[in-house]
Image (spheres, helix red, strand yellow):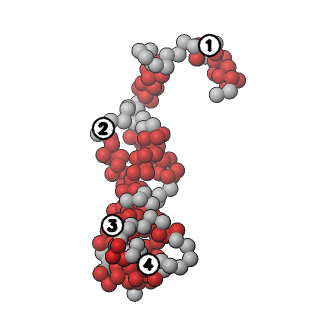
Amino acid sequence: MPKEVVQHLADQVDASIEDFFDSYGWGGKERSYTEHRKAIRNLFGFRELTANDNPLFVKWLEEQVQFTHDTDYLKNQAYSLFRTWKVEPPSVGSLKRMIESAIGNFEKNLYKMTYQQLSPKTCSRLDAFLESHSDEGSDDFFEAEIPNEENNGILTFRQYYPLQANSGKGFLAYSTVSVLLLFFTK
């Protein structure tokens, strides 16, 4: 923070800059910031996030990620929700992990549900498509091949699905398969 800003704040409360930094207890038994956060929460009628709030927040996130995966939007909406609940939000890192986890879970469930609804005929067509394109152009699609002696190292759709579902790249995998399904389910 620029020294001028700190000086301006110090002037407003008739304090010296040293009062803000030198005597402020950041750790150990003197955690001034913890007491100040508590005082601010009490002043505005907020409370800390509790273990009972987490399932409610996870449920809310699960509903939201069905419509968007825009993490900035979800973060802003989460902050609005916490204000409505009058709850101090989790740390930035915790909130980010919660949002990413909700998106990942949604994608895995959607991908799994789609895969389970495919007919054997569609899976066979996808396998044939993947096999027919394994020798062409770029091998980027096949970088993470699962060794399979029966298929001479060619990745089949039935192998590709679990690989992608667990890779953390679910949306890309789902998009790829969605395009393929448009061609093979007719």
| Mark toward the viewer: 1 or 4 | 4
The crowd level at tag 2 (other Cα within 10 Å; few <14, some 14-19, many 20+) is few
- Residue 125 to residue 143: above or below: below
| Mark toward the viewer: 3 or 4 | 4
Q: Residue at x 40, y 36 (%)?
A: 87
| Badge 3 vs badge 4, beta-carbon distance below 8 Å | no
Q: Residue furthest bottom?
A: 186
Q: Secondary structure at mark 3?
A: helix
**Disc 2 residue type?**
Ala
- Residue 181 to residue 26: above or below: below
Give the residue at mark 2.
51
Instruction: Specify the label residue 117 is tagged with.
Output: none
| Badge 1 vs badge 2, beta-carbon distance below 8 Å | no
**Disc 4 residue type?**
Leu
Q: Residue at x 42, y 62 (%)?
A: 170
Give the residue at mark 3.
112
Q: CA distance from mark 4 to mark 2?
A: 46 Å
Give the residue at mark 4.
130
**Disc 1 residue type?**
Glu
- Counting residues from the start of the chain, the first of labels 4 and 2 encountered is 2
- Between 99 and 140, the one nearer to me in the picture: 140
Q: Residue at x 37, y 32 (%)?
A: 48
Q: Is residue 135 left or right of residue 50?
A: right
| Mark toward the viewer: 3 or 1 | 3
- Between 55 and 185, the one nearer to me in the picture: 185
